[in-house]
Image: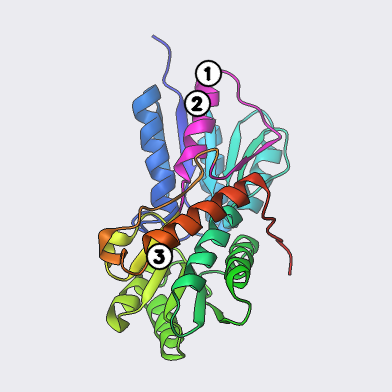
Amino acid sequence: MPNKIKVGLQLSVGGLGDQSFNDSAYAGLEEASHLYDIEFETATWQNPELNKVTLENWVKAGFDLIIAAGYGNAPTVAEVAAKYPDSRFALVDVAAEGSNIWSATYREYEGDFVVGVLAALVTQTRIVGFMGGGVTPIVRRIELGFAQGVRNVDSSISFISDYVGDFDDPEGGRLLAETQYMLGADVIYQVAGRCGLGAIEAAQKFERWIISTGGDHSHLAPRAVLTSRIKNVGRPVRDVIASVVEGNFEGGVVKSYGFAEGGLTLAPIRPSVSKVVTPPIQSIMQEIQAQVISGKIRVELED
């Protein structure tokens, strides 16, 4: 009987329980384990040097595939992959150079633009907020897509943007969201990992609205969360594991994920917010989404 394929997953900042990026990656790993009967290990984010030790230990233990999730892991993966060219690596959320690295990136703007349109259509104070976690190129790109969606509806709407500076600080997220609500924002788009859980608490406390990312967070505050732009981190995790199982892994490849590839979805609009996100607004969102996917609407990813 052949040995089971061994996979290691190095998680990003925030770790399991963030109900967002890391939990989604882990869900893909679990799905793959059921589909292909693989063996796997996960490692909590520590710091680049300790993460490097983890990856090298997996290489020395003969793991068939080593996956790392998140922007912060990119330099470490590039370094270790160059040192061990005969091992297979995957990096999810950012592209890496290396003939033995398979990378997955996202066209987040497809969803960010749509929820920007939503925020502009529902705001009553005409002040919309954006709350990021760490200041990374990916989150900055998400902010730009969201802001363009807002401006697409009405360029005179005021736009507040702040960053917590971390992805693992729910209290910091709560305080920052409270500040934006006190400044007059009535809807915030949070892209902040575990910090976003605190922002959702603030939305509920202030009886304002929030649009979330990562997973579907509507259940956390059914009357406050309008929708979630879900980033399916588990999809590329499952895909790259399948490529190893099926013997067609390709290093040096960057695969882009959007709505069409199952990398992005918008959470269903729940009845608890249907008086805010009305059927006409939902129809506009669907039409805008189709136009972004088709390229009829182009989202600029630079300042």
Give x and y (percent) for residue 33. 37, 29
**Residue at image location 55% in from the left, 39% down from the top:** 260
- Closer to the chain start, of discs 3 and 1, is 3
Give x and y (percent) for residue 22. 43, 52
- Closer to the chain start, of discs 2 and 3, is 3
**Residue at image location 31% in from the left, 83% down from the top:** 206
Please name the amino acid that badge 1 sits on: Glu
Q: Which residue is label 1 attached to?
A: 246
**Residue at image location 48% in from the left, 46% down from the top:** 233
Check disc 2: other Cα within 10 Å, few if <14, some if 14-19, many if 20+. some
Q: Which residue is label 3 attached to?
A: 194
Looking at the rendered image, the quarter that the C terminus falls into is: bottom right
Q: Nearer the viewer, residue 117 or 51?
A: 117
Can see residue 289? yes
- The stretch of residues the image draws in magenta is 230-259
The reply to whether callout 3 and callout 1 are in contact (CB within 8 Å) is no
Quarter location, residue 30: top left
Q: Residue furthest bottom?
A: 183
Please name the amino acid that badge 3 sits on: Arg
Check disc 1: other Cα within 10 Å, few if <14, some if 14-19, many if 20+. few
Q: Is residue 287 above or below residue 104?
A: below
Give x and y (percent) for residue 181. 41, 85
Q: Which residue is label 2 attached to?
A: 242
The reply to whether callout 1 and callout 2 are in contact (CB within 8 Å) is yes
Can see residue 213? no
**Residue at image location 71% in from the left, 34% down from the top:** 252
Instruction: Decide if residue 68 is on the left or right side of residue 222.
Output: right
Q: Nearer the viewer, residue 238 or 141?
A: 141
Q: Nearer the viewer, residue 143 or 272?
A: 272
Looking at the rendered image, the quarter that the N terminus falls into is: top left
